[in-house]
Image (cartoon, rainbow, N blue to C red):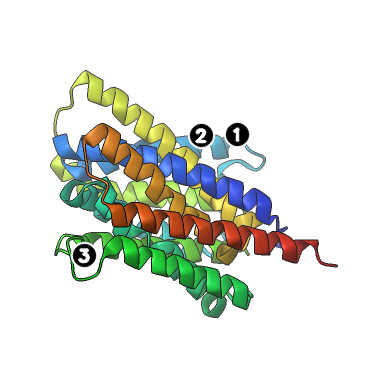
Amino acid sequence: MTTRQNTTLGVWLMVAVTLIFALQDGISRHLAGEYNVFMVVMIRYWFFATFVIVLASRMAGGLRNAARARAPKTQIFRGALLALEIFVAIISFVWLGLVEAHAVFATYPLLIAALSGPVLGEKVGWRRWVAIGIGFVGVLVILEPGFGVFKPEALMAVLAAFMFALYGLLTRFVSRFDSSAVSFFWTGVTGAVVTTAVGIWFWEPMIGSDWAWMALLCVTSATSHFLLIRAYEVAEASAIQPFAYLQLVFASTIGITIFNETLRPNVAVGAVIVVCAGLFTLWRARVAEARP
């Protein structure tokens, strides 16, 4: 299938995704601090899978069309990879806190943008490479190599960043063959199978108020991943990835205001650098689109 490119729409979708991701990360941090992380993610995926199955059944062609993937092995792998990445990421939120975990996790857009050329064959101009490089400098400012952030627990956030970058590249790859509805279906169903196989052994009773938080987590999870699939479907990964850095800003705000975490000066400076790099990339993309 041919995907129509619309970089501006892709950027706004990515901004919405980062905000929703930050909200669900805050909810996940709360729930995983009270209950086993494997159970939390499993329940989240039960709702996710139910939602995608109901949605697919009401679309033209029903479940048969939704499950008819042209790259089924890749769809299964990316769905399982995302489920495992969520396990790892939430553990890093509990161990490090949202601010520091996201400071490390912010490396994933750089990985996607840098690999989108050799892996996906997308054209990345030198100006975008400069913006990516500036964004990487901002990440180094955030991380302060050799100082407080790089403790052993940070390796969990590094692993999560790599896994999510690979998931992002695979999502862009399958969008060449399968619609967003097909990718959405396989993401939910595969993730539910993987998380249930692990989480069912760690069931714990949950109080009523936390079930409300769990319900909100489920809704944001389904919404965010559908928007992410659409973003990759309408725009090149290298053009929209710099805006994923906004998740760091949103998540840090939640960590500071809700969980009483500390915003160190280097984190604030680094966040400004990466956001500016993203804005420059958007400007360059729009200039390129305006050319005959």
Distance between mark 1 and mark 3 Cα atoms: 42 Å
Residue at which label 1 appears: 58
Percent position (x, y) of residue 265?
Answer: 29, 53
Q: Quadrant of the N terminus?
A: bottom right
Distance between mark 1 and mark 2 Cα atoms: 7 Å
Q: Is residue 164 left or right of residue 194?
A: right
Label 1: how many Cα within 10 Å (few below 14, some 14–19, many 20+): few
Say whether residue 67 is visible. Answer: no
The mark that comes first in sequence, 1 or 3, is 1
- Residue drawn where x is 26% and y is 51% of the image: 264
- Residue drawn where x is 22% and y is 44% of the image: 262
Q: Secondary structure at mark 2?
A: helix
Q: Is residue 225 left or right of residue 89?
A: right
Circle 3: residue type: Leu
Q: Is residue 177 left or right of residue 245?
A: right
For the residues labelled 3 and 2, say whether their Cβ atoms are less than 8 Å apart.
no
Q: Name the residue at the top extreme.
A: 208
Residue at which label 2 appears: 54
Circle 1: residue type: Arg
Residue at which label 3 appears: 155
The mark that comes first in sequence, 3 or 2, is 2
Q: Which mark is residue 216?
A: none
Percent position (x, y) of residue 12?
Answer: 60, 46
For the residues labelled 1 and 3, say whether their Cβ atoms are less than 8 Å apart.
no
Circle 2: residue type: Val
- Give the foreground label among 3 and 2: 3
Q: Secondary structure at mark 3?
A: helix
Percent position (x, y) of residue 97?
Answer: 22, 47
Distance between mark 3 and mark 2 Cα atoms: 38 Å
- Residue drawn where x is 61% and y is 73% of the image: 127
Label 2: how many Cα within 10 Å (few below 14, some 14–19, many 20+): few
